[in-house]
Amino acid sequence: MRRAAGILFGLATHGLFAVTVWYLYWFLKGPATISPTRAHLGIDALLAIQFAVPHSVLLLPAVRRRLTRTIPAAFYGCFYCLVTCLSLLLMFAGWQPSAPVIWQTTGIGSMLISAAFFGSWLALFYSLHLTGLGYQTGWTPWWHWLRGRPLPPRGFEPRGAYLWLRHPVYLSFLGLIWFTPVMTADHAVLTGVWTTYIVVGSCLKDRRLLFYLGDSYQQYQAAVPGYPGMLLGPLARRRMSATEAGQNRPGQEGRSDIPFRRAA
């Protein structure tokens, strides 16, 4: 019964993931017509936040360590994916479109922005492919559990877009929310909340990977900026002091001793 429940949980989670991605595409693409009513933008802001907060908190090493005392490690990725999907679906269901238009493009400008939107989707899946989409959704650890095989250590060797920036997934996601031919008030709220979330989440991801990967990620941070053109701050190239490096405590999963190489 436990095995049957585990199989059903994994399959149902990934089925829900596919449905959620479909709804996310149309939600971010925007409605065909603009709603004539004024929405409660505060509600929209709360809906955007209720996705962003657990999406970052559940990845914190301390939170994950506590939750895996009751959730088997092989299912934590699926659990994370499930929470993400449910929070997005809740946001879709409660979202209130708003009439005020901040900008609206037509003609060639609208075509170029729409092309950039579609390109951001391609860049997102390309970036997820580079890091392992199965790890992002929980499929890979669940699949190893299903086959009765131990999950191999997850190595770290940047390739493709990761040779030039540390967070191509987050940069692609920024394109999804910024590239819109019609920027309404409610979409501006979504863009503001999620842009803040992505910037903060990028810093948290750097800290998380430094915790798990140690020296190899420290070398990577020193060679590659978080985003193109970042010259200062935590998302620029960052050389850590020996004291900071000595405070790293790599976890039990995903540690890599592969040195960073700036070559494809």
Image (tube, rainbow, N blue to C red):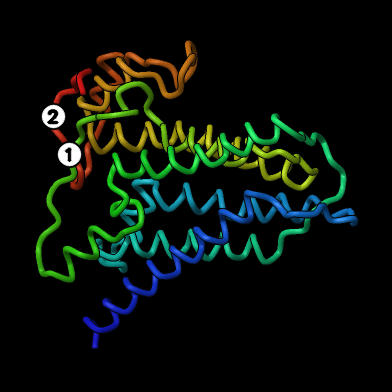
Give the image location of residue 196, x and y in percent: 60, 35
Q: Is 44 left, or right, of 131 in this rendering?
A: right
Q: Is 12 left, or right, of 96 in this rendering?
A: left
Instruction: Tell me which amino acid carries mark 1.
Output: Gly
* Circles 2 and 1 in contact, beta carbons < 8 Å: yes
Give the image location of residue 99, x and y in percent: 86, 49
Give the image location of residue 115, x and y in percent: 57, 36
Judge whether 182 appears above or below 91 on screen.
above
Q: Is 1 left, or right, of 233 in this rendering?
A: left
Which residue lies under the disc numbered 2?
A: 258
Instruction: Tell me which amino acid carries mark 2.
Output: Ile
Direction front: furthest residue: 107
Report helix, strand or loop for mark 1: loop
Quarter holding the N terminus? Answer: bottom left
Task: Say which of 205 and 157 sits in front.
Answer: 157
**Residue at image point 33% right, 73% down:** 11
> Which label sits on residue 32?
none
